[in-house]
């Protein structure tokens, strides 16, 4: 049986009856929906790290209540994943500190087979010297450039994307400097996350090494610093999510697990701190976890320190967050990897049970419902789903 | 204010390049601009501008770096100090100041003419103080007076603090002593930009020197005779060469590949008092090679560092051998060292003992082996005498040159002109080096390298060789395994926590 993305998501409730997680605790009942017409294949790409043999990209065909593993390819410590807007290419950042004997990370470009979703390496491109452990990548809205936030080297790289999907050498290297108050984690700049705004004219970036949130204009493949905002001292701003209407930016603190809300005015290039909630986010020295905002702009989701997921309602006027639900499943250690484009499903990795879960989302209340195991995999680090 | 030469400037194609035309590896790797600085304040302002713009600075004084540490800077800026030649002024009493952009030839002239002193430094006139001194700095007077920075009292260095602010530091044994130690031998491009070197005291320049040379024909060479030449040479430095009366003797055994006509020895000597009244040391040394059938007076092949005019000019001295007397300044300035540009590759090693027979045979084998399609006329293995005043062991703790037990320093040099010869040349020198250092004197874990031990003492950071990056222990080859590299990493964390200054072989955080 083939399922469309919507049918797949809506079918979750049925799946739970058929033996999916029975320990998932939701405050309200699960949601059932009617199946829709069938489209084509959807494919999930999961990056996993670990021993040399298990580090790589795993391709799953998304079929109904479970994902079928179709391909596993080796890749050195893959981290951030991003799909080309044309869905034909996948890019990954290799979270490594050496390539061909030099201190630098790499990024890889893969071609996606349109029929079976399988990946073929197009090329691997080294980052700038000293640019080790790239943390996050984003593609410019014109699809012509890949921007890399390089955590270890304190830099950003811009790489051109050719028509065949291959990556060229870095055409711009922006070296950052800065420190923060924490004597261990903030001795130097550590760019963490990059994301373009809806207009595509600029992108935002967090630097957890020096408590900075920056906005850069991006034109013709060149990034220019336009705005720099200091976060609270030693907060280590890391993952962030831009509200769909572009008004608010929510930034996760890697230090104390809080979420800060900033009001963003692109017209005048202003960014102002608005509010903070102590969200008890899951944090560690090595890695924090992403935030996701529903497409409606009403809800925000984040992994919490007790291995659960917290759901928040967003006040459209002032951006403030109000707690909706704390979703937790016993004997599981969850962190959110991705939200489906229609916001009806959250995908989370369960590092305790070595699984990827699909968790239904009530589009009206924002609450999380039934979950089921979509895939079995160890050390999943990031995920992206290519929908037809 | 610095002179900025960008891509639109007609000077750019000339100033962006390395003397080693093999580097950088591709057009995309060149820096986007060169900032030429005429004063220390120029340097500070230019560096601040570079850092604030998010660019990577690389630093150049004379531009003689053997690898691409300066010119491989895609989109970045080269901070060029070659115009930074502020005059020597005696400050604070007997202090001498040398600007980083001064060429060694200019330094010799200035120090001699103003004060009658000198620094024990290199033979290439156009090498500038900046890169030379911070990486070690040695030359024909080093057995007599030590390494250049053994005399160093302080430096002015611009560092970039954690928040990107350029800071001028005057560092010495009392102020930022850890950084001062790092500036004494760790190599350039690691911690900041040195603009000036200060010396409280310097040795008097010799009045005169003698130079001499011996050469040997490859056409009549045998393996046994070759082994005899090398072991005779090495034995001298291992034994008699440790006596203080020989410290004024510096020699280079320049072994050209047999595609050349000759190999040879060149030397320079003065007595410890700076005169050449007693030449018994020279005569004794030259006499050791009588049984090796030398050709006295014939010019030795000139590698880049040979004492090129050692036996063709100067006043002839009476005696058994063709020894020529020169005023020290004439000899020092006239030697000059080769300049110009070409394609090149270098390697190095320190030796604590004489050559073994197996090592000498290995060298002979490679020097006489012709590789089809590879022209090896441009290869030289320069075996420099070492030790003497360099080997004052206490200086290993005060400086960042820890090699204080060696008697010879080897430099593998290969020069060629055409890009199509790159692969063959690079492979040949790499294979030769690996073969030479895969012997019973090297622990199998470190095979193919002169890893520090009873026989070898690693490599010289001012002759950097990126091939060594293939080994995870490359820092130990250059900085030893007794704690110097961790010390330098701590200095790096303290003074350049953002790794603003970096290159392929810089100290890593």
Image (cartoon, helix red, strand yellow):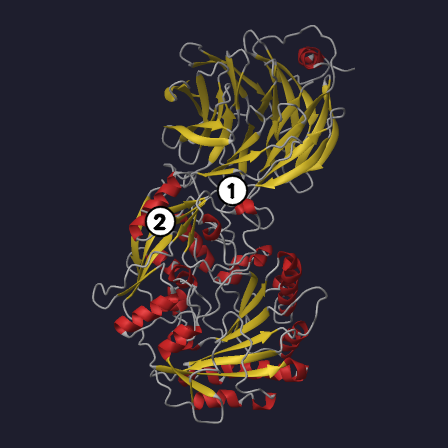
Q: Nearer the viewer, residue B383 or B154?
A: B383
Identify the secondary structure beneath mark 2.
strand
Q: Residue furthest left?
A: B93
Query: What is the distance, in whole Å, between disc 1 and disc 2 at their CAs?
Result: 21 Å
Q: Is residue B59 above or below residue B284?
A: above
Identify the secondary structure beneath mark 1.
loop
Q: Label 2, on which residue?
A: B159
Q: Residue furthest right?
A: A1
Q: Is residue B240 above or below residue B346?
A: below
Could you say where residue A269 lies in the image, as x and y percent from the top left? 39, 22
Q: Label 2 is found on which chain of the structure? A: B
Q: Label 1 is found on which chain of the structure? A: A
Q: Residue furthest bottom?
A: B319
- Residue B318 can be seen in this image: yes
User: Quick check: B151 left or right of B261?
Assistant: left
Could you classify mark 1 by the number of other residues whose Cα lies within 10 Å: few (under 14), some (14-19), or many (20 or more)? Answer: many
Q: Is residue B299 above or below residue A370?
A: below
Q: Quadrant of residue A375?
A: top right
Marks 1 & 2 on one chain: no
Q: Label 1, on which residue?
A: A131
Could you say where residue A5 lies in the image, as x and y percent from the top left? 68, 15
Disc 1 vs disc 2: Cβ atoms closer than 8 Å?
A: no
Could you classify mark 2 by the number of other residues whose Cα lies within 10 Å: few (under 14), some (14-19), or many (20 or more)? Answer: many
Could you say where residue A51 lies in the image, as x and y percent from the top left? 65, 41
């Amino acid at each position: 049986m083939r399922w469309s993305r919507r049918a797949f998501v809506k079918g979750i409730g049925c799946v739970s009856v058929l033996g999916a997680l029975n320990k998932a605790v939701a405050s309200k009942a699960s949601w059932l929906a009617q199946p829709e017409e069938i489209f084509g294949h959807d494919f999930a790409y999961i990056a996993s790290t670990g021993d040399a043999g298990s580090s790589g990209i795993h391709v799953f065909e998304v079929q109904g209540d479970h994902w079928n593993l179709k391909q596993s390819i080796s890749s050195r410590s893959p981290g951030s994943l991003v799909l080309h807007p044309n869905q034909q290419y996948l890019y990954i950042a290799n979270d490594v500190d050496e390539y061909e004997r030099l201190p630098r990370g790499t990024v890889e470009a893969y071609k996606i087979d349109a029929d079976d979703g399988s990946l073929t390496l197009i090329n691997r491109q080294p980052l700038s010297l000293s640019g080790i452990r790239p943390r996050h990548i984003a593609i410019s809205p014109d699809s012509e450039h890949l921007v890399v936030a390089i955590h270890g080297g304190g830099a950003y790289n811009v790489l051109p994307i050719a028509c065949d999907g291959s990556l060229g050498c870095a055409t711009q290297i922006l070296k950052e400097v800065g420190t923060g108050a924490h004597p261990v984690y903030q001795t130097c700049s550590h760019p963490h996350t990059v994301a373009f705004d809806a207009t595509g004219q600029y992108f935002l970036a967090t630097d957890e090494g020096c408590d900075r949130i920056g906005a850069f204009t991006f034109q013709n493949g060149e990034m220019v610093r336009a705005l720099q905002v200091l976060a609270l001292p030693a907060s280590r701003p890391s993952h962030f999510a831009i509200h769909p209407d572009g008004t608010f930016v929510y930034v996760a603190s890697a230090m104390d697990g809080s979420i800060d809300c900033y009001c963003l005015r692109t017209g005048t290039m202003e960014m102002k701190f608005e509010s903070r909630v102590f969200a008890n986010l899951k944090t560690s020295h090595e890695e924090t976890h992403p935030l996701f905002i529903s497409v409606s702009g009403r809800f925000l989701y984040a992994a919490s320190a007790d291995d659960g997921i917290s759901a928040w309602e967003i006040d459209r006027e002032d951006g403030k967050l109000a707690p909706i639900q704390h979703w937790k499943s016993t004997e599981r250690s969850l962190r959110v990897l991705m939200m489906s484009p229609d916001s009806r499903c959250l995908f989370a990795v369960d590092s305790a049970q070595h699984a990827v879960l699909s968790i239904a989302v009530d589009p009206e209340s924002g609450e999380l419902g039934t979950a089921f195991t979509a895939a079995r995999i160890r050390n999943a680090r990031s995920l992206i789903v290519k929908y037809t | 204010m610095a002179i900025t030469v960008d891509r639109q400037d007609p000077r750019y194609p000339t100033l962006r390049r390395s003397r080693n035309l093999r580097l950088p590896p591709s057009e995309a790797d060149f820096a986007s601009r060169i900032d030429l600085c005429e004063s220390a304040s120029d340097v500070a302002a230019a560096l601040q501008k570079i850092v604030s713009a998010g660019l990577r600075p690389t630093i150049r004084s004379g531009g003689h770096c053997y690898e691409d540490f300066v010119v491989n800077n895609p989109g970045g800026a080269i901070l060029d100090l070659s115009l930074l030649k502020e005059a020597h002024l005696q400050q604070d009493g007997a202090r001498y100041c040398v600007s980083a952009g001064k060429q060694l030839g200019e330094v010799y002239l200035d120090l001699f003419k103003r004060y009658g002193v000198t620094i024990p430094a290199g033979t290439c006139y156009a090498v500038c103080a900046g890169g030379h001194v911070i990486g070690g700095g040695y030359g024909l007077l080093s057995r007599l007076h030590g390494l250049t920075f053994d005399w160093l009292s302080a430096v002015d260095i611009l560092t970039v603090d954690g928040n990107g602010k350029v800071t001028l530091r005057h560092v010495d044994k009392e102020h930022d002593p850890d950084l001062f130690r790092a500036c004494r031998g760790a190599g350039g491009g690691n911690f900041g930009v040195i603009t000036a070197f200060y010396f409280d005291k310097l040795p008097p320049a010799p009045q005169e020197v003698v130079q001499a040379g011996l050469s040997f024909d490859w056409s009549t060479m045998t393996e046994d005779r070759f082994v005899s030449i090398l072991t005779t040479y090495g034995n001298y430095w291992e034994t008699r060469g440790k006596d203080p009366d020989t410290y004024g003797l510096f020699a280079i055994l320049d072994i050209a590949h047999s595609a050349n006509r000759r190999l040879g020895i060149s030397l320079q000597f003065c007595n410890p008092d700076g005169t050449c009244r007693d030449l018994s040391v020279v005569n004794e040394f030259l006499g050791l090679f009588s049984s090796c059938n030398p050709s006295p007076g014939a010019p030795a092949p000139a590698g880049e560092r040979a004492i090129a005019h050692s036996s063709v000019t100067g006043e002839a001295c009476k005696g058994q051998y063709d020894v020529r007397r020169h005023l020290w300044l004439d000899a020092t300035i006239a030697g000059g060292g080769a300049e110009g540009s070409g394609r090149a590759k270098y390697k190095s090693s320190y030796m604590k003992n004489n050559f073994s027979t197996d090592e000498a045979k290995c060298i002979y084998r490679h020097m006489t082996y012709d590789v089809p399609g590879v022209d090896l006329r441009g290869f030289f293995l320069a075996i420099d005498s070492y030790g003497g005043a360099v080997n004052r062991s206490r200086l290993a703790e005060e400086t960042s040159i820890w090699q204080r037990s060696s008697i010879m320093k080897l430099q593998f040099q290969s020069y060629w002109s055409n890009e199509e010869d790159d692969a063959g040349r690079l492979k040949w020198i790499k294979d030769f080096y690996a073969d030479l250092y895969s012997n019973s004197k090297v622990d199998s874990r470190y095979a193919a390298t002169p890893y520090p031990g009873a026989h070898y003492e690693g490599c010289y950071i001012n002759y950097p060789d990126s091939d060594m990056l293939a080994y995870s222990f490359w820092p130990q080859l250059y900085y030893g395994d007794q704690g110097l590299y961790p010390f330098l990493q701590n200095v790096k964390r303290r003074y350049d926590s953002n790794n603003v200054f970096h290159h392929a072989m810089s100290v890593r955080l």
